[in-house]
Image (cartoon, rainbow, N blue to C red):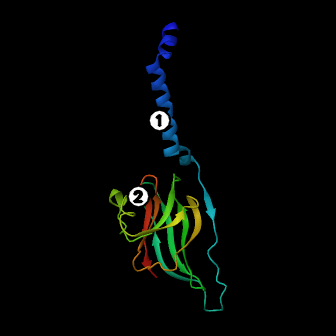
Amino acid sequence: MGRVRRLLTRPIVIAALALGTVAVAVGVYWFQPWKLWVDETVRESAPVSTGAPGEGTRTLATGTLISHEHTTTGTVRVLRLPDGSRTLRLEGLDTSNGPDLRVLITDAPVKEGRAGWHVFDDGAHVSLGKLKGNKGDQNYALPADLDLDRYGSVSIWCDRFDVSFGAAALARA
């Protein structure tokens, strides 16, 4: 027991223990491993038409999410509301939770497998904000000047690690 006590009082050992403690704290903050076991479910309703008959909400584009870094399923719809505004809607989303997840609309092609993991922030892309939850249905307002002919894909993007959890190519309706 005396040898251990003497060892623990040496400056080099104290410095190594302090450095190790700081490294573990930074690693826990950076990776946020508890999010692997915590799901956040969001159940937003689809935007409702409040216009005159025949002026309802229209679907402009649709897509199906494929998995990239994490298993991801669900569908994407781009909706035009009667007032002319547009909303990107995620429906039946099911993916892993993670640190700093965002919804990106991009000009990158959707590629299956590892080839598609890192491409969505390479070209033109617009962040629609933080992912509200890793499960459920949710709505994101699209900028009024966003050209849907230029942006043809959506990614659930981990900004912390620059990787796509899943993505969908948008097909015009």
Amino acid identity at mark 1: Ala
- CA gap, disc 2 and disc 1: 29 Å
SS class, disc 2: loop
Q: Which residue does the image show at 50% across and 40% down from the upper left?
A: 26
Q: Which of 172 and 8 is in front in this view?
A: 8
For disc 1, the marked residue is: 23
Labels 2 and 1: the sequence-earlier one: 1
SS class, disc 1: helix
Q: Nearer the viewer, residue 118 or 23?
A: 23
Q: Which of 118 and 57 is in front in this view?
A: 118
Q: Which residue does the image show at 52% across and 80% down from the upper left?
A: 144
Amino acid identity at mark 2: His
Residue 153 in the image: state x and y as whole percent.
Answer: 42, 71
Residue 5 in the image: state x and y as whole percent.
Answer: 52, 12
Residue mark closest to the camera, 2 vs 1? 1
Numbered badge on residue 68: 2
Quick one: which residue is furthest to the top in this view?
2
